[in-house]
Image (spheres, coloured by chain):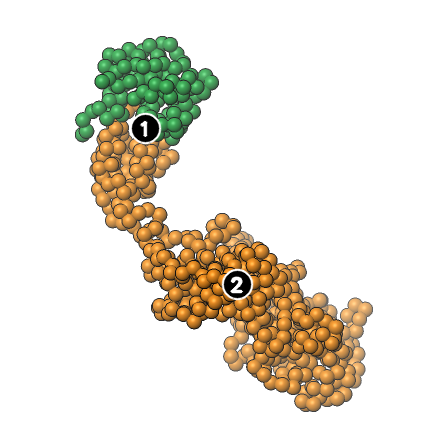
Amino acid sequence: MSRYLGLFVAEASEHLEALGRDLVALEGTPSAETVDSLFRHAHSVKGMAASMGLEPIAQLAHRVEDLVDVARRVPGALGRDRVDLLLTTTDAMLALVRGTGEGNPPAPQPELLGRLGEAVTALTGQAPRPTKVAKVDPLAQPAAPLSTRRFEIRFRVLPAAQSPGPRAFLVFKKLTGLGAVTHLRPPLEDLRAGAIPDGRVALVLETDGGLEAVRSALALVPEVELVSAEPVADEPAPEPQSVATPSTEPARTVRVRTELLDDFLEMAGELLLATARLRDIGRRFPEHERPALDEGVDRLHALVKDLHGKVMGARMTPVAVVTDQLPRAARDLARKRGKDVEVSVTGAEIEIDRAILDAIAEPLLHILRNAIDHGIEEPSGRASAGKPARGRLRIAVRRTRERVVVDVEDDGRGMDPEKLRAAAVARGKLSPEAAERFSPREALMLACLPGVSTATDVDDVSGRGVGMDAVKRSVESLGGALELESQPGRGTRVTLRLPLTVAVVQLLLVRAGGEVLGLPITKVLGAVELPDASLQRSPSVNLITYGAQLVPAHDLARLLELPSPRPPGARPWVVMESEDGTVALGVEALLGQEEAVLKALSRPLDRVSGLAGVTILGNGRPVFILDVPRLLA
Amino acid sequence: MPKRVLIVDDAVFMRNMIRDIFSSGGYEVVGEATHGIEAIEKYRSLRPDLTTMDIVMPYKSGIEATREIVKGDPKAVVVICSALGQESLVMEAIEAGAADFIVKPFRAEDVLAVVKKVLGETPKG
């Protein structure tokens, strides 16, 4: 039984999570399909729990099934209170299932059973069917019955046989009529072709007919002699692969621990680095010896890159893994606040790297909390603003060329740039003069400064110390960006722009302050050579001419507080995109381009503003990758 | 009581030869058919203990006829009369439910040995 337990916990949890989602969906827009889906999930859980002999879970699932069944016949049967009851039951079952996985047998739930029973009685006027659920022992129903015995059978096609192939095939057919044949030697193709060395055939037969049936069957076949038939040890039955996953796609898949995928990525990344190192070493060889080596390294690089791509592909996970939880979370949160919210999710099927998905789960939840807590008004407030009583939260995921964009949009009261300005000044984050220079849109971003919020109350909904500043930081640490748009009275939209995958970045290597540093090439617009003397100096910032535009120019070494030797002649300026427009960075030299595997910084370096990560170059040297927007902030 | 045999072959020569073999072996030939459709009809009306079946015949092949006969009567004993070089057809016939096969050109004692074996008339071992 225990070997089914892990599978049971996984499958039953999936069904119960789906049950919860369906219940929330049902409350939003009731539909017959949702009710059917509810019923199927409850039914599956009941069957699985009963098979495992977990009566308390099976009983609850059975009662849920009863109540949902009534809902099929009585429209509107599942009002808010009954959905609440069903959600509570679903949570309880989930807890029991997980507890079972940890070795705690489920306890009976008379109180919940009673309430479910009352709900059924209230709707039908009849007491529900008894909840005793028959126990089914899964061991009694594997592919073959318990009496199954395995025999190794050897037979020989006599040399006089005119057609040894059909002869051996006939025996094979007769034995498959008795049970399952495995370990056939020679393999079936050879057998049929008559390629049977010395006429000898061996196989393993799993049959409940016993050896006598084997002997009788072979006795009827001419030109064949039975050499031996002996029982062999039982092999473990193959794991039931799809006991309860009625997948519509019969894709051949295996479950892999996510840590394993992390390991694969790490190793593929290390391989990329090792290849780069090999290429670097190759450069030291004399010219005439290099082509062969380069060819090998090129081939290796192509293979490793392909492998890396495949591993990345395997890590791609639908956004649904995170967004599926949001409607339920929003509902619970809204009820706590006396509000009514309907959540819609689109584009949940879009895939993104698992690591990024993991990292945005919390931020997304926080954005949702903010929207419900501060955005969506109470029903009365919405009524006086001429809005429908039920607030709307729209989560839209879409894919652009290189990014996944997640919009979280509410139709609540919106954010007031003036109040944010005032709050930032009042909390000493900003001088009144600086605040004045912010455009309304820039002022909205003040909500992302630590400690700035227009909310005066601190509550258990969003006053948990995770502010928009934390959301912004975590999105940016992934190489993403956060944008805010809001119209007072109309609503707020938070947009997350996320990279599809982590890890490999193309770097422009530069030297500044004597250090080698990496700049992400995706942000580089170009480079120009200019002497410092050609800078146009304005009071607040220096400017260089890039094409037809004037671009703010910074000495990279000075930004990093490194010694800046300031060579007398022309030096390279790297022109880059940043959030506040284009910017030029003065460096000492451009060193080249390199593909690098981005590694996140660990403490305490992750506290250093302006560093996006670190990588190891081909020569084994670590190089910091700069986060230019944060460097300038 | 002698076992009852139905012979199916489109060649008169073969039918006569097979009939002689069975008669000499103490079997009763209860009918003959010259193609697959006739074979199915005769099998249904005669219910023989054993049917010999040629493979390549007009209207309906021996393989199809075997499939339908066995489908209608899973206990039917159909022995395929094949020629050398027809191995793959024989295996198709076995898939279709044939109990055994004999290979032309055959000798009387070989045919009778196979038939005895298939009908379980030889002592085991």
**In front of the other: A475 or A362:** A362
Rendered view: A192 above or below A271: above
Q: CA distance from mark 1 to mark 2?
A: 57 Å
Q: Residue A227: x and y, percent?
A: 21, 35
How crowded is the residue under tag 1: few (<14 C-alpha within 10 Å), some, or many (20+)? few
Q: Which residue is mark 1?
A: B75
Q: Is residue A468 left or right of residue B62?
A: right
Q: Colour of chain B?
A: green
- Pointer 2 indicates a residue of which chain? A
Q: Residue A385: x and y, percent?
A: 74, 75
Number of marks drawn: 2
Q: Which mark is residue A212?
A: none
Rendered view: B46 above or below A82: above
- Pointer 1 indicates a residue of which chain? B
Residue A378 visible in the displayed image? yes
Q: Secondary structure at mark 1?
A: loop
Residue A94 visible in the displayed image? no
Q: Residue shown at 37%/63% (left/top)?
A: A55
Q: Which residue is mark 2?
A: A123
Q: Is residue A323 left or right of residue B6?
A: right
Q: Residue shown at 26%/24% (left/top)?
A: B119
Could you tell me the amino acid type at mark 1?
Lys
Q: Quadrant of residue A219?
A: top left
How crowded is the residue under tag 2: few (<14 C-alpha within 10 Å), some, or many (20+)? some
**In front of the other: A598 or A10:** A10
Q: Colour of chain A?
A: orange
Q: Secondary structure at mark 2?
A: helix
Q: Residue shown at 61%/70% (left/top)?
A: A479
**In front of the other: A610 or A233:** A233
Q: Residue A191: x and y, percent?
A: 34, 33
Q: Residue shown at 33%/59% (left/top)?
A: A1
